[in-house]
Image (spheres, grey):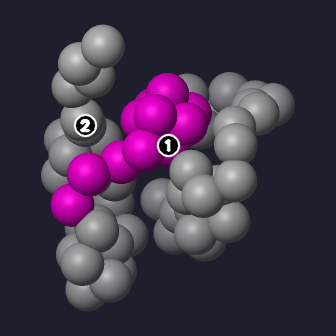
Amino acid sequence: MIRRLTQFAKLKLSEPTLKAVEKMEFVYATEIQSKTIPLLLHGKDIIGQAGTGTGKTVDNPVYSPFIF
């Protein structure tokens, strides 16, 4: 199965957040990131589940309401 990868630049992150993501050299969001970040940006509460190594922990600062 071929899955299209979403670029962080297309997720409508704030400029400071996008710069931080780029500084860490992340270009593409994982599946859990690309599905949850847009919901969070619209103020939705979420519960997500994804396997080890899928980018959940690195997203904690991205999800912070203080940097949107």
Which comes before the other along the chain, label 2 or label 1? 2
Q: Quick one: quadrant of the N terminus?
A: top left
Residue 25 inside the magenta-drawn segment = no
> Residue 19's image quarter?
bottom left
**Disc 1 secondary structure class:** helix
Q: What's the amino acid at mark 2?
A: Thr
Q: Which residue is mark 2?
A: 6
Q: Which residue is mark 1?
A: 33
**Is 28 left or right of 30, judged from the image as shown?**
left
Give 48 or 3, whichever is nearer the viewer.
Answer: 3
- Highlighted magenta segment, given as a residue range: 27-38
**Disc 2 secondary structure class:** strand
Q: Position of residue 42 (x, y in %)?
A: 53, 30
Disc 1: CA contacts within 10 A as few (<14), some (14-19) or many (>=20): many
Q: Position of residue 5 (x, y in %)?
A: 24, 35
**Is 45 left or right of 53, judged from the image as shown?**
right
Q: Position of residue 36 (x, y in %)?
A: 56, 33
Disc 2: CA contacts within 10 A as few (<14), some (14-19) or many (>=20): some
**Is 20 left or right of 59, judged from the image as shown?**
left
Tell me, yes or no, whether the two marked residues, 2 and 1, touch with CB atoms within 8 Å: yes
> Residue 66's image quarter?
bottom right
Q: What's the amino acid at mark 1?
A: Gln
Furthest-front residue in this view:
1
Label 2 and label 1: CA atoms lie apart by 9 Å
Query: Which numbered dot is residue 12?
Result: none
**Is 12 left or right of 38, judged from the image as shown?**
left
Q: Position of residue 24 (x, y in %)?
A: 32, 83
- Give the main secondary structure, helix, strand or loop, of the magenta stretch: helix
Considering only vertical position in the picture, is 60 above or below 47? below
Residue 39 in view of the camera: yes
Furthest-bottom residue in this view:
23
Residue 32 inside the magenta-drawn segment = yes
